[in-house]
Amino acid sequence: MLVGSSFRRHFSLCTMPLMPQYPDCVKSLPKPLPASTVEARKEDDLELEEEKLENVDHLSAKELLQLHVNHAKKVRARLRNQRLQRIERYKDRLALLLPAVADQQPKNDPAS
């Protein structure tokens, strides 16, 4: 029979709720890196683009096509750079969400 303080200690331990050894929650993803400073477009570039737009009336179809192709290349390059910057910012989060490279190879593959 437990007497005195040992009884109280035993009783308090028995009435404590059992806490799981590991928390039952999802580990939060790491914060993305801060957005890098976006390269500011020069005012000269903006003025040149405006001049190009103003002077398209006297251009031939071939010259207009060349302007369009050059503009499309610049837009694609800008979008590609933005995508690569986003991937770099969120690389830590993506690594947690995507399977590891070793997990992607089949088990029966002779290369492994």
Image (cartoon, helix red, strand yellow):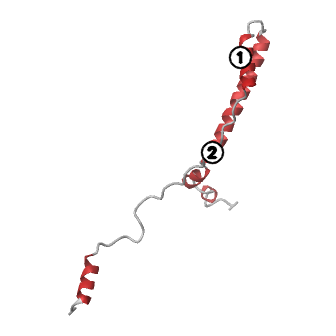
Q: Residues within 10 Å of mark 1 (few under 14, many from 20)?
A: few
SS of the residue at dot 1? helix
Question: 7 or 111: which is nearer to us?
Answer: 7
**Marks 1,2: beta carbons within 8 A:** no
Asked if residue 44 lies left or right of residue 82, the reply is right
Give residue 61's mark: none
Task: Identify the residue at image location x=63%, y=59%.
Answer: 102
x, y (%) of residue 104? 61, 55
3D distance between C-alphas at marks 1 and 2 = 33 Å
Question: 93 or 53: which is nearer to us?
Answer: 53
| Quarter-of-image position of residue 80 | top right
Give the amino acid type for the residue marked by disc 2 in the picture: Ile
x, y (%) of residue 87? 63, 45
Question: 85 or 34: which is nearer to us?
Answer: 34
| Quarter-of-image position of residue 109 | bottom right
For disc 1, the marked residue is 50
x, y (%) of residue 49? 72, 19
Q: How many marks?
A: 2
Task: Identify the residue at image location x=70%, y=30%.
Answer: 41
Viewer-side label of 1, 2: 1
For disc 2, the marked residue is 87
Q: Residue furthest top?
A: 58
Q: State which quarter of the image contains the N terminus.
A: bottom left
Q: Residues within 10 Å of mark 2 (few under 14, many from 20)?
A: some
